[in-house]
């Protein structure tokens, strides 16, 4: 009784299927449900023929199996099989472009593909899209013809290799992607005419072109790669990851980039044998770059000097970041403090005695640090070379490696003391004659100091006495004979006794 009911349903579906639009057919299939005793029929079929594909599924999808039986029966008749009740040897949908895409969309049919099907012909249907991989569920088939369609993309070679009984495969006149050379074994299994104009056959002409391009392109790539690495390593190492950068060594290209090509806009000063620039490194750090015109000795000596300078750590010393040294340039890169020198500060700000004294103490502390830790390093403590931090601290910005004479350092500090305390117009009168300047101050000390002291300090009785003591120390240090008998530590002890309250600084 169940088989009679199924047969009636199949006949009704067959009669209705051909003129129906694909969307309507799919909707009708979705609304079909198996009769109540359909499960008994399927179990009986599996007992008779366990090799049926749906027999191995657990649990059984009765709805899908029911739809499969309907589509299988219709497809068997459409393919003009002689006896669809007993045999279903072929699927023949040649030249059926209206219904072929519909059948290909029935995944449930191909999943339970009848094991009797040995030939599948879907040629000449203008089917578009990728390879209909569901067809390969029919693993027992011997013939598969997909020629004269509009299929594209990759051919599933690995899946096709699992269809072991396949002897005839026709993919001609499609638009598949070219197969890899490594998969060329696939063609040995089939006649090459099966792939005519399919797009998958490797083009020897194209491979020759690719080979020529590779032969020509590879050296070019190597040259550009090596050139790029050379540029990174030797010109712009600041583009490398931080772990690979030499943070102390700068290149000319890096300094040019930091100063906009050593532009006049970036230049902030000139001196005897050097030009000073303000720069911004790639990471945003502002720096002071001194470029020396006399090349400051040979390359190795200069680098060794700079390796010492980058180790200096004191609050009154400008921090040295690194150096640049090659055939064309010698440069020192330090932190950027600003453009205010002590000389400018004295002339424009008219600081009080206490602030001037603070600068002297700071300079002397830095000199003590250098004398104790780095005795071979001298420094330039001219008012034009000393910088002033925004918090009022003095900063020594220029150094000399190899200056061992303590007496010269003390003498230079004595000149600094006198310059800090006396009237600048007086200093201008002597025009760099240090000896004459010192002798003139010594001549007026102590009774006529008012003539040389910078009146802008507006001294009180107490501060005048402290200024007198400070000038006395300056004269002692500036005296060539006396300074040879003193140490920088002794000078420091003398200075801090002038105004002990200030030396908490």
Image (cartoon, helix red, strand yellow):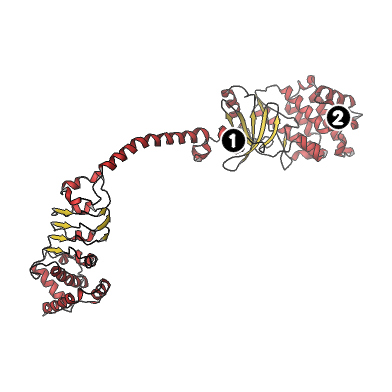
Compared with 27, 280 (above or below) is above
On the image, which quarter does residue 38 sit in? bottom left
Return the residue nearer the eye: 432 or 405: 432
Quadrant of the rendering where the C terminus is positioned: top right
Residue wearing tag 1? 256
Compared with 151, 288 (above or below) is above
Residue 405 % position (x, y): 70, 21
Give the side of residue 498 with respect to residue 130, left or right: right
Residue 426 bears which disc, if any? Answer: 2
Which is more foreground, mark 1 or mark 2? 1
Q: Is residue 422 visible?
A: no
Residue 160 % position (x, y): 20, 53
Residue 57 % position (x, y): 19, 66
Give the side of residue 5 with respect to residue 464, left or right: left
Few, some or many residues within 10 Å of mark 2 (<14, 14–19, 20+): some
Residue at (18% x, 47% y) in the render: 187
On the image, which quarter does residue 89 sit in? bottom left
Few, some or many residues within 10 Å of mark 1 (<14, 14–19, 20+): some
Quadrant of the rendering where the N terminus is positioned: bottom left
Q: CA distance from mark 1 to mark 2?
A: 42 Å
Q: Is residue 155 visible?
A: yes
Residue 215 bears which disc, if any? Answer: none
């Amino acid at each position: 009784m169940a088989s009679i009911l199924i047969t009636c349903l199949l006949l009704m579906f067959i009669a209705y299927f051909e003129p129906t639009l694909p969307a309507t057919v799919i909707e009708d299939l979705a609304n079909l449900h198996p009769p109540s005793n359909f499960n008994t029929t399927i179990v009986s079929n599996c007992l008779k023929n366990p090799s049926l594909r749906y027999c191995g599924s657990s649990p059984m999808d009765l709805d899908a199996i029911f739809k499969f039986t309907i589509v299988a029966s219709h497809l068997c008749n459409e393919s003009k099989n002689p006896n669809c009740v007993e045999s279903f040897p072929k699927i023949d949908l040649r030249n059926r472009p209206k219904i072929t895409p519909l059948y290909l969309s029935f995944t449930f049919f191909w999943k339970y593909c009848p094991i009797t099907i040995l030939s599948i012909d879907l040629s000449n249907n203008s089917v578009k899209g990728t390879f209909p991989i569901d067809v390969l569920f029919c693993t027992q088939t011997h013939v598969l013809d997909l020629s004269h369609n509009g299929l594209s993309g990759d051919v599933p070679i690995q899946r096709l290799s699992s269809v072991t009984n396949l002897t005839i495969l026709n993919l001609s006149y499609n638009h598949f992607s070219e197969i890899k050379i490594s998969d060329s074994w696939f063609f040995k299994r089939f006649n090459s005419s099966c792939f005519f104009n399919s797009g998958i056959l490797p083009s020897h002409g194209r491979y020759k072109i690719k080979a020529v391009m590779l032969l020509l392109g590879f050296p070019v790539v190597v040259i550009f790669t090596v050139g790029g690495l050379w540029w990174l390593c030797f010109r712009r190492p600041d583009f490398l990851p931080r772990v690979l950068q030499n943070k102390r060594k700068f290149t000319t290209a890096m300094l040019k980039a930091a100063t906009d090509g050593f532009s006049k806009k970036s230049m902030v000063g000139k001196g005897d044998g050097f030009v000073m620039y303000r720069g911004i490194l790639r990471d945003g750090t502002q720096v002071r770059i001194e470029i020396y015109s006399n090349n400051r000795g040979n390359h190795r000596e200069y680098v060794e000097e700079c390796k010492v300078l980058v180790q200096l750590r004191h609050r009154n010393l400008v921090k040295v970041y690194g150096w640049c040294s090659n055939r064309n340039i010698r440069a020192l890169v330090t932190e950027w403090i600003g453009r205010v020198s002590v000389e400018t500060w004295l002339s424009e700000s008219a600081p009080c005695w206490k602030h001037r004294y603070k600068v002297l103490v700071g300079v002397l502390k830095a000199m003590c640090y250098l004398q104790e830790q780095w005795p071979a390093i001298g420094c330039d403590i001219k008012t034009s070379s000393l910088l002033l931090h925004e918090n009022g601290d003095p900063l020594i910005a220029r150094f000399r490696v190899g200056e061992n004479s303590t007496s010269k350092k003390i003498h230079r500090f004595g000149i600094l003391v006198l310059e800090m305390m006396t009237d600048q117009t007086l200093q201008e009168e002597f025009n760099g004659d240090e000896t004459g300047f010192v002798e003139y101050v010594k001549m007026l000390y102590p009774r006529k100091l008012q003539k040389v002291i910078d009146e802008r300090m507006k001294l009180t009785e107490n501060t005048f006495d402290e200024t007198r003591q400070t000038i006395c120390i300056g004269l002692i240090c500036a005296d060539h004979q006396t300074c040879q008998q003193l140490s920088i530590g002794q000078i420091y002890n003398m200075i801090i006794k002038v105004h002990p309250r200030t030396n908490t600084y």
